[in-house]
Image (cartoon, rainbow, N blue to C red):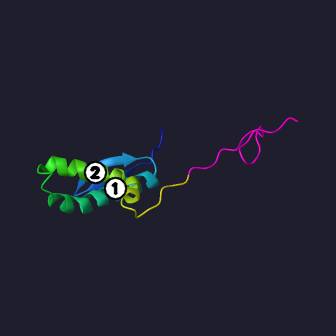
Amino acid sequence: MAVITQYVVVRDGEQKMSFTTKAEADAHDKMLDMVEGLFPLLEQSDVLTDEKQIEDMALFLAREREQVLIALGAKKPAKKKAVKTDGSSSAAGKPKDDA
């Protein structure tokens, strides 16, 4: 018999999702907290009139929170790491002289 540990996210007495790691469950729970925080703000919008649209937009913004923070200027985008070359060019990025 196998023993399986599951972490279950429960909201308002309703099971939302289950995960195999605590970190995944915590991340999902945090995202749901963000949705709850965004919902009242989005309800004030004249653009989103349907409750399903509001919920979908809140969920989208919560999932894409890193990009939202970057777009708002609250966070800087992650810098891409420079790729090392195989030594066929110099540090200035120019080909080596064979002369």
Q: Residue at x 43, y 51 (%)?
A: 24
Residue designated by label 1: 31
Amino acid carrying mark 1 in the image: Met
Residue 34 position within the rendered picture, expressed as x and y whole percent measured from the top left: 30, 59
Lateral position of residue 52 relative to residue 86, left or right: left
87 vs 13: above or below: above
Lateral position of residue 29 relative to residue 44, left or right: right
Element type where label 1 sits in the image: helix
Q: Which residues are magenta?
A: 80-99
Q: Distance of mark 1 from mark 2, alpha carbons?
A: 8 Å
Residue sitting farthest toward the top = 98
Work out whether residue 88 or residue 65 is closer to the camera in this orientation and state it. Answer: 88
Residue 89 position within the rendered picture, expressed as x and y whole percent measured from the top left: 76, 40
Lateral position of residue 23 relative to residue 80, left or right: left
Neighbor class of circle 1 (other Cα within 10 Å; few <14, some 14-19, many 20+) is: many
Name the chief secondary structure element in magenta. loop
Work out whether residue 71 or residue 12 is closer to the camera in this orientation and state it. Answer: 71
Circles 1 and 2: CB atoms closer than 8 Å? yes
Q: Residue at x 88, y 36 (%)?
A: 99
Amino acid carrying mark 2 in the image: Leu
Taking the magenta stretch, the answer to whether it contains residue 82 is: yes
Element type where label 2 sits in the image: helix
12 vs 16: above or below: below
Neighbor class of circle 2 (other Cα within 10 Å; few <14, some 14-19, many 20+) is: some
Taking the magenta stretch, the answer to whether it contains residue 26 is: no
Q: Residue at x 35, y 50 (%)?
A: 63
Q: Residue 59: which numbered mark, if any?
A: 2
Q: Residue 66: which numbered mark, if any?
A: none
Residue 23 position within the rendered picture, expressed as x and y whole percent measured from the top left: 46, 55
> Number of labelled discs?
2
Residue 27 position within the rendered picture, expressed as x and y whole percent measured from the top left: 40, 55
Which is nearer the N-term, disc 1 or disc 2?
1
